[in-house]
């Protein structure tokens, strides 16, 4: 089982092995994002996220002769590797917290690549909030508590929105509407910085789409998402201005 960014080591929850496990929700999660300069963003989050974060796309797998590479949207948190500009003194300073962060320290993970439905609620067992002394119990009398059931519901919704986002991104790739982007900025201290490795809307190809393709995008709700993505890119300069040296 691979560990996604921000996580230490994921383990599947077991009602016997972890029957006494508790989560101390007073342990702040925000510091765990200190080295994340971007996080996955579901399409349903674009409306809130575009007000604060640049929304870009990244290749999420290698292309093959049979298929084009998949892409995924990201909320950009910093312009340097390992730099999160929305974390200050251990506190999250943004108004909107992406769901990727809010689901921590839990995640849904596939346990067996050969079994399409073998997914389980997992937890980062390296997280300091887990223990047996205090916090929210995960199990009671061998059954998930309401706390854990709510966490699972959140995770299942996250996975559903992630799948919806994947299909949306596949359509953008199919229509060849994304291109490599490069952002140059001068920081307040005079340092110049280049940001590469992301994808953004290909304005020329978007403008040249035939009417039937535009109608298809409109009916699938993509016109609004594209506009939110375009609007969000103005936040790149705001991020650059956050650097103080």
Image (cartoon, rainbow, N blue to C red):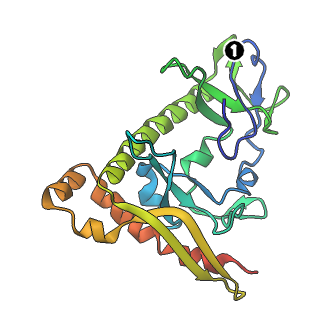
Report the front residue among 225 and 142: 225
Is residue 55 rendered to the left or right of residue 207? right
Report the front residue among 176 and 106: 176
Farthest residue to the front: give it. 65
Q: What residue is at 61 percent from the left and 75 percent from the top?
A: 194
* Count of all numbered marks drawn on residues in the image: 1
* Residue 63 x/y as whole percent: 46, 46
Q: What residue is at 36 percent from the left and 52 percent from the top?
A: 173
Instruction: State whether residue 153 is above or below residue 175.
Output: above
Q: What residue does disc 1 label?
A: 15
Secondary structure under badge 1?
loop
* Residue 151 x/y as whole percent: 59, 32
Is residue 37 rendered to the left or right of residue 160? right
* Residue 59 x/y as whole percent: 50, 52
Farthest residue to the left: give it. 211
Farthest residue to the bottom: give it. 190
Quarter holding the C terminus is bottom right
Q: Quadrant of residue 242?
A: bottom right
Instruction: State whether residue 219 is above or below residue 164.
Output: below
Quarter holding the N terminus is top right
Density class for disc 1 (Cα within 10 Å; few <14, some 14-19, many ≥20) is some
Farthest residue to the right: give it. 133
* Residue 120 x/y as whole percent: 59, 23
Q: What residue is at 57 percent from the left and 67 percent from the top?
A: 196
């Amino acid at each position: 089982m691979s560990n996604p960014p921000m996580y230490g080591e994921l383990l599947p929850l077991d009602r016997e092995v972890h029957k006494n496990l508790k989560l101390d929700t007073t342990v702040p999660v925000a510091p765990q994002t200190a080295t994340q300069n971007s996080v996955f963003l579901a399409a349903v989050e674009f409306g809130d996220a575009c007000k604060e974060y640049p929304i870009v796309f990244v290749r999420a797998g290698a292309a093959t002769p049979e298929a084009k590479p998949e892409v995924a949207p990201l909320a950009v948190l910093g312009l340097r590797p390992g730099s999160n500009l929305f974390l200050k003194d251990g506190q999250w300073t943004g108004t909107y917290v992406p769901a990727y962060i809010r689901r921590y320290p839990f995640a849904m993970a596939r346990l067996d690549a050969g079994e399409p439905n073998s997914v389980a609620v997992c937890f980062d067992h390296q997280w300091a909030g887990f223990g047996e002394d205090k916090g929210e119990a995960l199990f009671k009398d061998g059954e998930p508590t309401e706390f854990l059931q709510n966490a699972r519901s959140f995770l299942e919704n996250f996975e559903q929105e992630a799948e919806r986002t994947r299909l949306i991104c596949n359509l953008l790739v199919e229509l060849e509407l994304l291109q490599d982007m490069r952002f140059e900025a001068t920081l307040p201290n005079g340092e110049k910085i280049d940001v590469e490795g992301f994808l953004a809307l290909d304005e020329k190809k978007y403008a040249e789409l035939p009417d039937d393709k535009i109608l298809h995008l409109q009916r699938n709700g993509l016109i609004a998402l594209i506009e939110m993505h375009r609007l969000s890119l103005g936040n790149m300069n705001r991020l650059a201005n956050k650097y103080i040296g």
